[in-house]
Amino acid sequence: MTVLTSALDTTSADYAANRDAMLAKLAELDTEQAKAVAGGGEKYVARHHQRGKLLARERVELLLDPGAPFLELSALAAWGSDFPVGASIVSGIGAVSGVECVITASDPTVRGGASNPWTLRKILRANEIALQNRLPLIGLVESGGADLPTQKEIFIPGGQMFRDLTRLSAAGIPTIALVFGNSTAGGAYIPGLSDYVVMVKERAKVFLAGPPLVKMATGEESDDESLGGAEMHARQSGLADYFALDERDAIRIGRQIVGRLNWRKLGPTPKPAPVPPRYGEDDLLGLVPADLRVPFDPREVIARVVDGSEFDEFKPLYGSSLVTGWADLHGYPIGILANARGVLFSEEAQKAAQFIQLANRADTPLLFLQNTTGYMVGTEYEQAGIIKHGALMINAVSNSTVPHLTVTMGASYGAGNYGMCGRAYGPRLLFTWPNAKSAVMGPAQLAGVLSIVARQSAEARGLAYDDDADTQMRQYVQSQIEAESLAPFLSGRLYDDGIIDPRDTRTVLGIALSAIHNAPVKGADGYGVFRL
Amino acid sequence: MIACVLVANRGEIARRVFRTCRGLGIATVAVYSDADASSPYVDEADVAVHLPGNTPAQTYLRGELLVEAARSAGADAVHPGYGFLSESGAFARAVLGAGLTWIGPSPDAVDAMGSKLEAKRLMAAAGVPVLDELQPDAITEADLPVLIKASAGGGGRGMRIVRSLADLSGEAEAARAEAASAFGDPTVFCEPYLVTGRHIEVQVMADPHGTVWAVDERECSIQRRHQKVIEETPSPLVERIDGMRDRLFDAARAAAKAIGYTGAGTVEFLADETGRFFFLEMNTRLQVEHPVTECTTGLDLVALQLHIAEGDRLAAEPPMSQGHSIEARLYAEDPATQWQPQSGTLHRFHVPDVGAEFTVPPGPSGIRLDSGVRDASVVGIHYDPMLAKVISWAPTRLHAARALSAALASSTIHGVTTNRDLLVNVLRHKAFLAGETDTAFFDRHGLIELATPADLDRAEPVSALAAALAIDAAARLDAPVLRGVPSGWRNVVSQPQRIDLDGPSGTHHIAYRFTRAGLVADGHDDVELIESTPRRVVLDQAGVRRAFAIARYAGAPGHVYVDSALGAIHFVAVERFPDPAEHVAPGSLLAPMPGSVVRVAAAVGDAVSAGQPIVWLEAMKMQHQINAPVDGLLAELPVREGQQVDVGTVLAVVSTLEESE
């Protein structure tokens, strides 16, 4: 085992400046997350409590094992949209009766828990995480259904919510619905398609059509309880498997159900008694330059994330702009690919492709630590086959079947985002540091490219080019692209699973790895044709 | 020469006798009831004989079974201990009649003193001062209060104070019933009740050759329900009054000589502050509190009993006594709820820095422990709830009191409620330290106050926090997954972790969170967490660091015992999820303790009035009346006479008239 040594100077002015910049970003993150926690605001929270109901996060907290962690996902969903931050639902991974589960809890204080397009995306992402990682899914349901003004974004794709449930069930992954309130119309299929259903007495309301619609459709007079109350479903329709006396009772029953799943994790067990890193997590705040153009050594990050700061580097002398090597994290063996100086050259791409294949041969999960400006451009590199080599890496990443985890530590630009397992490449979980940015290219470069193309077009048509307008255009484009490449914006669109405090990286990855190991870990048998 | 002794008793006194026997090379035989089968004293005896059943009447009061046990186990002598048949002349005769040695006075002497009525007359004739006897029929208002005593009684049982004439016949009835159950003899008598007084007694030891020692006096004024709680020698009163000791010793020797006494005995007197005293009774056996005399004199009183039974001669004079010794009786009882006896599993019992068990500690001072229990002992409902006697010995009374209170305060006692806090508070009370002890001590100084730990207001909240942190640490270690992640870790924080604990003064809602900067606990801003493990939590509170030892037991889920320099506090964790099945009908009368139903005085459908007794429950030989809480109808009566019930069992349900209609 090789123990990393740190060259970080925590007394330097740069370190202090970097730390201040990161703390400012974290303060912004806290502010945004607080919006999600606040739900529908004081008035609706108070009203909800007055009705004797628990808030979404209170339900989740009670459901979890005492002392167990909860990794909340997509906390900033809908950031930058017209909908409240958090998308009126809580989702995350936590332990219930000793079993790691994906938990979703609608927040009825936000517009009655109605689903908007971002809610839908957040639910579908949670379902995907449950399916890929073989995690039981527990839904804490109380939703007024779809946000009707945006139904066009919800209705047709929203069918996947129900399809996911039964596909999870078919894959042997238990689905449990605890119904605390409304779950009507389409929402009725959530309990309808779950393996286990618990309904709360005099609170749960599960029917296809409520009394007014029934009256309109058939003329029948009816009421909520006889159409879809917990008692009716428990005694007559059989849709409710468990009749809970109150919310706490429902959560108690939910925990009891999970406790009886006879759940066994199928991945290998971690090594016992992992030792913490030798360097403090706090250093991570001052490590990343506030200016993303300044590269930093990812080994400093690895030294603060992996067990005992032990890292056995693979091919250290070749393609040194990408660091590859083996380590353990919370006792789980992992292979790490980390950008060292931003740019990926042919050597780095080839090294990555080989390393990914080795990890698949050894059934070892991979961690991608992104800080990349993309693959090198220019005639020399094009002629040397940078496309072919980049394709090798993308091929390997795409067809690798060991679990991938990605952390965007800084820049994630261009095809580097693809090669380093960006969102489209299906990492099991992807987290972003608050300072990170991602786009097809840097804002200045993008604006400059537009400017050159416009100038060439004007010149080709013999027109004079308006330099003032060009400056304005460049500024506008640059600021727009800048805003759209920031972490909260991307997280709001669910292009990651959450922005995390860099100091939490080890803990987040530890939870992620443990969750992943509910499913078998198995390397790929084949890849696409490698263009050599 | 005695070769093998059967102890016709149980618990700590059996262990005490065995200890001396072992030292003398005498073999030992224990007898045990069903409930005592795994008691320490049974293991310590060379052989043990089973007495089937549990109640004393089935077991330790069955003289013929005991004699048969001695015979079958090869014992040649019987030591009766105290209580049970220790003062039964008939038993002593049976033992002698079987050709065995009786370790005690002659049966005639036992009988002479066994009837308290008869004894008073004898003593008066011998010139020993006595209180007048009152005829129940002749008692008038002017005689009140009076005391009803069981003629055959002892140890406070069968005694009743009567303050109003209306209660006289009922109390006499109850005293007779209790006396019959405890001693097999229902005779009771009345005498004036001195509301305050001092209980002073003299240890005598007499050999068959005419030597009678008055060894030392003991003061046992701190009593509850006429049962001694704290005993000491020398007596602060006797020390204060010139010549009183000589007068006492003369009276005690006269008492012993009047009946030709041999062996160990105790002459009990009631004294007032001026030094006047009256004969109460003579106990013709070893006393519970004999260890204090052993500590100050260096004698082994049990050894002397054995030697005298073998016909040996005492020296002319007893040894001089030195220093001061105090004994505290640790009872499984709750002083704050009418001394209700407690039962259950004693998960842990440990007294620190014990210098000796059942013998005098070496050196000029020390702690002695005479205990009948050990870790995991089950404290049952059939016998006296005394767990152990803790005795200190030191050059002065103040030193002895300080050492004893410290030993008790730092003892680890988990599983049953005890009178420990009361004992500690009494031993540290300025009136006690000033020697102002009399039988009304608890009434004068407030029982509830004395029973409450001194520092509870300060100790309880931080102890609850420590308990919660230990529970938290245990939950992390026991977690099947994600064990390596910090407790309660959240990337999006919305609320603290919560653990609710019921403590002595109410429910503690512990809300806490671990942050990068350390522990944040609501209401504990000045507390810093130094260390937390399932068994030990170290907290720094406003610059003072304290370790809390935390104990939980598999057999008692939810129960948490916290011991620290601030005191011992017991908490019960509140279940996160109330069990929907636990639901008691309003108006239900629940058994306040385990016991047996001895009487049922109403039938389902009867109209009952508030306060009317419905069920009598006997536990620990005390009868507890269960009364109707309101006027109404007896709706349910799920128990019958003779039935054993557990604490919390529904005994009866009374519905109010409105409910019934």
Image: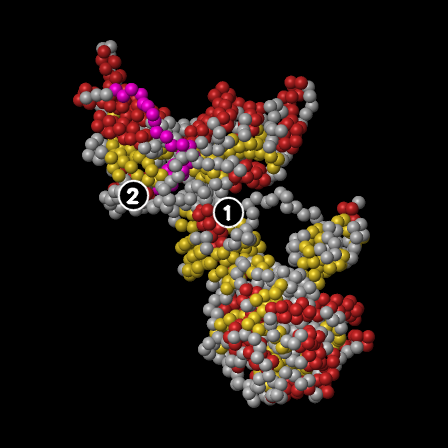
Residue B106 in view, yes or no: yes
Answer left or right for B652 relative to A127: right
Magenta extent: A502-531
In this rendered view, identify the residue nearer to me: A92 or B306.
Answer: B306
Q: Which residue is mark 1?
A: B498
Residue plotted at (74% across, 79% down)? B117
Answer left or right for B80 relative to B539: right
Residue plotted at (64% across, 76% down)? B100
Looking at the rendered structure, whether the residues under marks 2 and 1 are on a common chain is answered as no
In this rendered view, identify the residue nearer to me: B454 or A231.
Answer: A231
User: Three-letter amino acid code at disc 2?
Assistant: Ser
Chain containing mark 2: A
Name the mark on residue B462.
none
Residue B132: give x, y in percent of width and height.
Answer: 74, 81
Residue B421 in view, yes or no: no
In this rendered view, identify the residue nearer to me: A297 or B361.
Answer: B361
Picture quarter containing residue A470?
top left
* Measured Cα–Cα span from mark 2 to mark 1: 34 Å
Vertical position of residue A256 compared to residue A392: above or below = below
Residue A528 is one of the magenta-drawn residues: yes
User: Three-letter amino acid code at disc 1?
Assistant: Arg
Q: Which residue is mark 2?
A: A309
Residue farthest along the left direction in this orientation: A380
Residue plotted at (25% across, 27% down)? A349
Residue A66: give x, y in percent of width and height.
Answer: 49, 44
Q: Quadrant of the C terminus of chain A?
A: top left
Q: Secondary structure at mark 1?
A: strand
Residue plotted at (82% across, 75% down)? B137
